[in-house]
Image (spheres, helix red, strand yellow):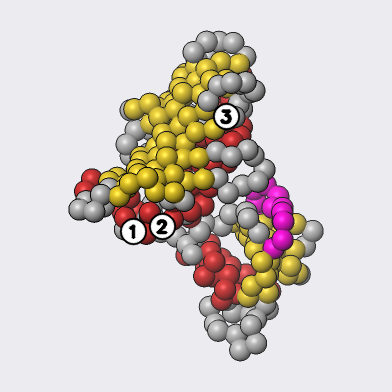
Amino acid sequence: MYTIANLPAVQRDLFLSRCVRNVDDLPRKAETLRIEWRDMVVAFGSDAAIAEASVEVSEDISITAFSRRMESLLDCGAKSEGLEWVMKFACRMSEYGTADEVRRLLCDKIASIDGLTGETIGVLKIKRRSVNAGHAKIRLVPNEDSLQLVVRHSSAQGLKAVWKSVLWRLKPQHGTPGAPGNEEEWQKFRELCERQGWDDPDQEQRYGGNYCDVYANGVDMQMSCPDGTLPQIGRKFRGEGNGQNCNWNQLRAKLNGRKFKIVTSRGNLWLKF
């Protein structure tokens, strides 16, 4: 285990409650000052309602599991005037492409590039308007197949926003690196299309086929489910902002292996990711 974050003000009591209620990812040990998973530990500095927290992870932790737990932890962040929230993370660069590809994905500014080794130091600037500006310092070390990040912000929510900007560029939310993509979910979607009498999503449609709107966290299919057999799964998807219209074939390309869940609400179909 190695320490990757020291967070100045976390609502300890709220996070502890979230951990023991999350049956999909129960910690193997949960105590007043320490929550342990096999590959991650959150330790608090005191038993106060709002306390400093440190985060340790093992080298083999899934970036997906890490992101999910960190997001929950940062959602419990309290106001901390004048304090900086910092998180460090390192992973294999080859999971996301060559050094040139990762450099293009992440570096909005480049301080240095080693012409022989390709080692790069750069900065990612946050793209979200909902929080004040934050940044992540990027270090790429091709010889060690290493991508190293130091994310900083003046608030917990800002730190989460910068980290999610990193994720959306690298696309790790598509699933654990190296694991199969969304083929199982896509098969369910094929069967659903056949059952409902919609166009075949694997066939090129001469006139474009069925259309849908893709948002930041899901797809509004705007399709009727007449047989009513689909269960409600997970949280309700919300279309925020302007959806981007696309057909089945374009949707498959946009999903690009991203994991999704089939969700219904008020008789309409959504894909949530």
Residue 4: give x, y in percent of width and height: 40, 29
Q: How crowded is mark 1: few (under 14 residues within 10 Å), some or many (20 or more)?
A: few
Q: What element carries label 1?
A: helix
Whole-angstrom CA distance, mark 3 to mark 1, is 31 Å
- The residue sitting at 63% across, 38% down in the picture is 132
**Magenta includes 145?**
no
Q: Marks 1 and 2: CB-CB under 8 Å?
A: yes
Sequence-earlier tag: 3 or 2: 2
* Farthest-out residue, front: 111
Residue 11 spot, x, y in % from top left: 61, 21
Q: Which amino acid does label 1 sit on?
A: Asp
Report the side of 187 relative to 245 (left or right). Answer: left
| Residue annotated with mark 2 | 104
Instruction: Write down the quadrant of residue 20 in the picture.
Output: top right
Start and end of the magenta stretch? Answer: 230-243
Sequence order check, earlier mark of 3 and 1: 1
Q: Mark 3 points at which residue?
A: 154
Q: Residues within 10 Å of mark 2 (few under 14, many from 20)?
A: few
Q: Foreground: 38 or 138?
A: 138
* Quadrant showing the N terminus: top left
Q: Which residue is drawn at 59% across and 10% down?
A: 48
Residue positioned 48% across, 53% down in the render: 169
Q: Which kind of residue does numbered mark 2 sit on?
A: Arg
Sort mark 3 into few (<14), some (14-19) or many (20+) by Cα contacts within 10 Å: some
Q: Where is residue 139 in the image (x, y as percent from the top left)?
A: 34, 43
| Principal secondary structure, stretch drawn in magenta | loop
Q: Name the residue under label 1.
A: 100
- Mark 3–mark 2 CB contact (< 8 Å): no
Residue at (62% x, 20% y) in the render:
81
| Alpha-carbon span between mark 3 and mark 2 | 26 Å
Q: Is residue 12 visible?
A: no
Q: What element carries label 2?
A: helix
